[in-house]
Amino acid sequence: MKAKFILLGTLLLSTGSMGLMAAQNAPAPEPNWLDKIKKPVPWLTWGGDLRLRNEYFDNGLTLNPNVRLHEQDYFRFRGRLWTAITPVEDLSLNVRLTAEPRYWVKDAGYGAIRGRHGADWQEGIIDNLYIKWANMFQQPLTLSVGRQDLRFGDGWLVMDGTPNDGSRTFFLDAARLTWDIKDHQTTVDMAYIEMSAWTDEWLPTVNNHHKALTDQDERGAILYIANKSVKELNVDAYFMYKKDHDIATAFGNRGDLYTPGLRLAGALGEHWAYRAEGAIQWGRRQEPRLGPNKNNVMAYGFNSRLSYLFKDKMSNVVSFDYEYLSGDNPGTSRIESFDLLWARWPRWSELYIYDYAAEWRIAQLGNLHRFGPGWTFKPIKGMDVILNYNLLYADRPAPALSAAPVFTRNGHFRGHYLQAIVKHQFNKYISAHIWGEVIFPGNFYTFQQPHTWLRTELMFSF
């Protein structure tokens, strides 16, 4: 059955590709009628998108090929509608509605219908609702208040406030003030976050499941300063505070974390580019996997990439990544595991976020050394090919309270990770991709069978 679904998805994408590419070759006028429909009056714009996915993975959630539900296969149908209303200049109300029902081909490994297959209608949710005020008091200030998507830098520490619903939503309930100092090519951002774990805490949902979008209520404050005045040395400096409280799931944390950090990025000559980011973390927190008590925290993280841009006909780029997230030392009373704050998302792997479910929680990457090369190129117009290989090591053995049978407790080699992606943008309305990943586990894990991932996607935007 699996082969049939994969074949069907591949044929659909291939057939769609040929038809769309043929259509692209024929001259066609810009569909101004659609632009007019999307902006019927000067003070209103609207749009939407529809994302169709089939995702299949094996051994990535259970880490054990011998148990039920080790193999997952499902379709995702995410639809979004958004609007921006601007009653007066520089003041707008922004709203986005989202729903993503699923159809499980195999019995679900998680979610509302865990252990069964078939349709899972899930919830319809307001995933953006905020007011944006630009040029406040005729000054270079922008204020956004409400439910909004937040990202700073490369999304290493701030990107996704709703990790428990996959990529359906990313929002944080927050207030953000941006000061744009154009003369110095500098921005200063200040943000306050007040995030409830539950979907229906502050705004209503359709087909309410009272779902936890994260594992605890969260409060936070961010100061982020970015300077781009020197091409060879862009500098970002930040300080972040995060408070976890009122646990919503068995994986919730309690405590306070303080995280200062520095990010450097730039171009080195015509062909080289780099980025490097490091942060220190301290505070006190309690993690269920480490025990019932709060302990002092002292942790470290580092993330980097060095790239060579060929600047040739196919836009070839080769790169090398290194990332370090400190792991907990069981021989001390402190917690040394680095927390990625609001960035539990598939930043470099769609598959490996599930491998962390037994070790910590889904997408809570940590206790990690990751390094390896990557290669991207554009073989034809609109197409991107992405190839990556990483060696993965654990900084420390798996914590004692993690799912014991799937970890060896004495190994540090997590395994070999390979990724291959083909993306194609047919036009500004339609895109597709095929995405594959495989992990060959090392001696950090008990079972050595490969973990695999395959996704096909078709995206319509309007």
Image (cartoon, rainbow, N blue to C red):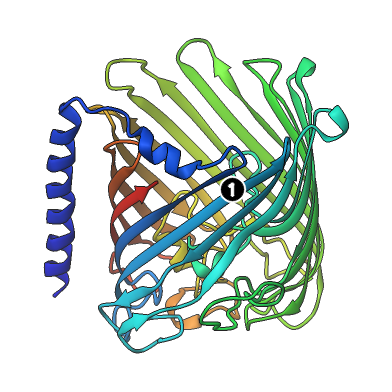
Q: Is residue 325 shown above or below 224?
A: below
Residue closest to the eye, 318 or 19: 19
The residue type indicated by label 1 comes to Tyr
Residue closest to the eye, 109 or 264: 109
In percent of width and height, residue 294 lies at 81, 75
Residue at screen point 27% across, 22% down: 314
Q: Is residue 437 shown above or below 334?
A: above
Residue farthest top in this picture: 269
> Is 22 left or right of 113, judged from the image as shown?
left
Residue at screen point 59% across, 48% down: 324
In percent of width and height, residue 351 lies at 39, 61
Residue closest to the eye, 144 or 388: 144
In percent of width and height, residue 273 lies at 52, 22
The residue where tag 1 is placed is 324
Using the rendered image of the protein, determine whether residue 411 is visible from the camera's viewpoint: no
> Is 383 left or right of 191, judged from the image as shown?
left
**Quarter location, residue 428:** top left
Q: How many marks?
A: 1
Q: Quadrant of the N terminus?
A: bottom left
In percent of width and height, residue 134 lies at 75, 36
Residue at screen point 35% across, 78% down: 64
Within 10 Å of the Cα at label 1, are there few (<14), some (14-19), or many (20+) other Cα atoms? many
Using the rendered image of the protein, determine whether residue 177 is visible from the camera's viewpoint: yes
Residue at screen point 57% across, 59% down: 344
